[in-house]
Amino acid sequence: MTAESATGRRAAVYEQTVGHFGTVRIVPLDPVGDVDLIHAWVTEERARFWGMLEHSREQVLEIYEYLDSLTTHHAFLVLLDDEPACLFQTYEPDADPVGECYDVEPGDFGVHLLMAPATAGRQPGFTGAVMTALMGYSFSDPGHLRIVVEPDARNEKAIERMVRAGFTLGPEIDKPEKRARLAFLSRKILFGRD
């Protein structure tokens, strides 16, 4: 890893212990330092809905260097006990093409999530535990009132995961690269208050 602190660990933007699973740390993605890992993940068949199956290493690097240059979109590597667990991206819906597909509300905060390949010995509930930390991070900013996701409408597994996490399904929308299913999780529903 690069961009590490003096302790040998990359500085986290958020950290949370999730039950018996361990400590989740969310660190900014280093496009150059992390490109091999991210390219390997996004080009696996299981990541087909991510839309990068045929992308070269250089194309993936270009995409994440571009994202790194934006103030409205951010990419993170999520670590569980310092092992890569997922790729997490955030965005402001009104600065993203998705904002043209629905009525963006003040406080909407968009996220994308790609879990790392499953490893032997991964415990049941792992994805849900990581999502708990990601929602904690997303709502750590009091200005974020509602999380917005828009998985590919054919990705039944992701949609089911969002429903289990408490998201309310919205309409299907047409984006240039896919037909997506909107889903929303409000701060009020999750925490019982605004």
Image (cartoon, rainbow, N blue to C red):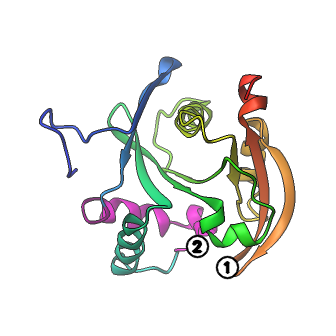
At 55% from the left and 38% from the top, the residue drawn is 134
Q: Amino acid at mark 1?
A: Glu
The verdict on residue 32 being magenta is: yes
- Nearest the viewer among 149 and 194 is 194
Nearest-to-viewer mark from 2 and 1 = 1
Q: Which mark is residue 51?
A: 2
Q: Name which quarter of the figure residue 138 lies in.
A: top right
Above or below, comparing residue 37 to residue 54 in the picture: above
The residue under the point 32% across, 36% down is 82
Residue bounds of the magenta highlight:
31-52
59 vs 192, left or right, is left
Disc 1 element: loop
Within 10 Å of the Cα at label 2, are there few (<14), some (14-19), or many (20+) other Cα atoms? few
Rendered position, 131 above or below 38: above
Q: Residue furthest left?
A: 6
Q: CA distance from mark 2 to mark 1?
A: 8 Å
Q: Which residue is mark 1?
A: 177
**Residue 145: x %, y % from top left:** 69, 40
Residue 130, image x, y percentages:
54, 35
